[in-house]
Amino acid sequence: MTLFREARMQTDAGLVEECRAGDASAFDEIVRRYKDRVYRVVYRFLGNHEDALDVAQETFIRAYGGIREFRGSAQLCTWLHSIAANLARNRLRDGSRKGRNQGVPLNGMDPADDCSPRTSAERQELEDTLQRCLLELPEPYRMAFVLRTFDDLNYETIAQTLGIPVGTVKSRINHARRLLRERLEELAIV
Amino acid sequence: MNCTEIHDEFSALLDGELSGEARVRIEAHIAKCEDCRRALDKMKRVDAMYRALDPLTAPAGFEKPIQAAIREKHPGQVQTARPAWRWRLAWAAAAACAAIVVAVGILRREPDTERFNVASIEQKSEPSEPRRIVQEHDAGKWQTAPTMDTAVPMALPSPSPTESTGDQGPESMPFKDLAVSIPQQSAAKESRKDEASESAPIAPPPADRESRKAKMPASESAAAPPPAERETGKAKMPASAPVTPPSSPVEIPPPSIAAERNQDDLPVQTALVPPESAAPASVDNEEAIDAGHDPARKKKAIADELVMPTNKLGFGAITIGSGLKKTDKRYVGMAAPLENDKRDMAVPEKTNTAKDVSPDRGDRKIVVERAFLRIGDAWVEDGYPQDAPTRILRRGSKACKAFFDKHSELKPLLELDGRIVFSFDKRWYRIEPAKKSD
């Protein structure tokens, strides 16, 4: 690998250029670099590993097919998250129709059922509870909150990813946190 | 701002998305409002809990379905990563190209290199022992052969007894002894000049050179270009610069020829500056030059030069004429004979102006796979080290016949006219013309 190519492979723009030039290894690098972030966001949004895996992989497949149209005006991660968000929303709607990804209603959770709060499964239960609470959020709030909390995107980037104004992002995230706080207060978690 | 408006800004406050003024205002409110402060603390805990969730990573084998799907959907676009052998192949091709370029460059330089090999005769002896090559003028005046640094007139070093006599006798004397046989015209050596011509090295060692430069009269310095000029091949002899005789008869600057050779074999102008002691005033015409030649003395000099000690005579300096390219610099030092003998050959004692010297031209020949350079009337094999003793073979002599009968492969050398200096079996031989029967 030449130094020049090596240097290009360090940046997202260089990776995209190499990928456009037909270098499959460049796209492999893109996948390697962003797979965890995409998968994490999709999973937190969908709450299901199987669907999250499908959506995340489909995200990269779609990205490969459209990388020649990617103009680079946005960041590569923004572009990937945008694809993932659309696919995840579509999957969520499809799942809703199929009865999947309903999650456990927060109302159905009874903290008293947690008979072993101090057991080794305590942490896992908390995580499940938090994930269920998250899945109870309305989809627009949820996606904004997920992108902010699990991928640490700023409001501007989230706005670009979702194609909404920054103010809307702020509002959605604030609503999501308030709803979660209220739910978790009900569950006596906070 | 009331508490509801403050609560709407909690997320922006937590995420650092508030401007300075808004943040100050909200923080001021929170500091005073217990309910808002408690609500903000809970929101911070909720956010911290979600951030503390397991940082999920994509499962192993995540890429495989992607690659498979891409190959399936875009079969013509997918390229595998460039394998290592392709890089090796590319490097090998690049190396081959570089080798070809170098080879072509060497081949294209071959003519120059061949031409330059002869010049290396001079260069090999620099600077510890300057090269001494001679020319013999057919009118009986020995001309100096060019060296790399002979543009500066110098006094001659005294010959050592071993040099002058040689352990091997007259049949084994350095070729430098051929160098010059110029009738000494100084008063101190007047008595000897008709009996023998003395030879001397054209250029003394650098150490001597420096000391002699200091002793050099101003006019000599003016006649000889500075070394820098000689190196660039731009040095020019003043058109009619007379050479001032040296102040001391002991320090006789030798006439020397610094010949430069044009890359394209263009005529190179050289100017011979005769030894100041040997030069009378100035010679402006050919007749005057010829008048200075004594055929009888010449014959005597030729006959005696083989046995005469060397380094006794002084020589003038040669400066390089114009018409040279900068690229000719690498040919400086190429020994070249004077092409037109009487007309072009400068006679030391007669020639004291640049216009008396005509352009000089060297010839080369390859005989028996050896490169020979024409120096005066001699063909000198490339690589001849100065002061190397030479075994003399006179044409027509029994020894010469026996030698070439024994080494018949060298017989083509005899086709060269004039003197021949060549090496054989780690020895240097010199073929001399046959003695003329009176």
Image: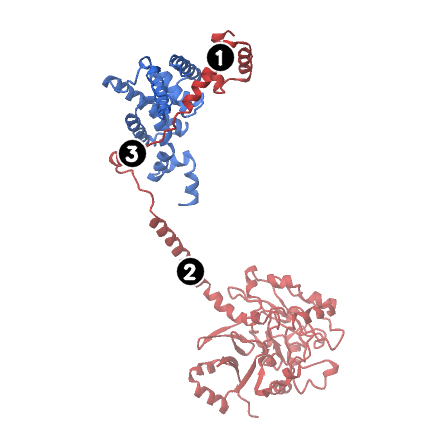
Q: Are marks 3 and 2 on the same chain?
A: yes
The residue where tag 1 is placed is B38
Type of residue at label 2?
Val
Is B376 displayed left or right of B274 in the figure? left
Residue appearing at x 65%, y 77% in the figure? B289
- Residue on which the image places disc 2: B104
Image mark 2: chain: B
Alpha carbons under labels 2 and 1: distance apart: 85 Å
Instruction: Output the letter for the chain in blue.
Output: A
Q: Give the image location of residue B4, x and y in percent.
A: 47, 8
- Residue B43 at x, y = what percent? 45, 16
State the SS at label 3. Answer: helix
Residue placed most toward the observer, A166 or B229: A166
Residue B285 in the figure: left or right of residue B73: right
**Label 2 Cα neighbours within 10 Å, binned few <14 / some 14-19 / many ≥20:** few
* In this rendering, the label closer to the viewer, 3 or 2: 3
Circle on res. B66 = 3
Q: At numbered mark 2, what does the secondary structure look like: helix, strand or loop?
A: helix
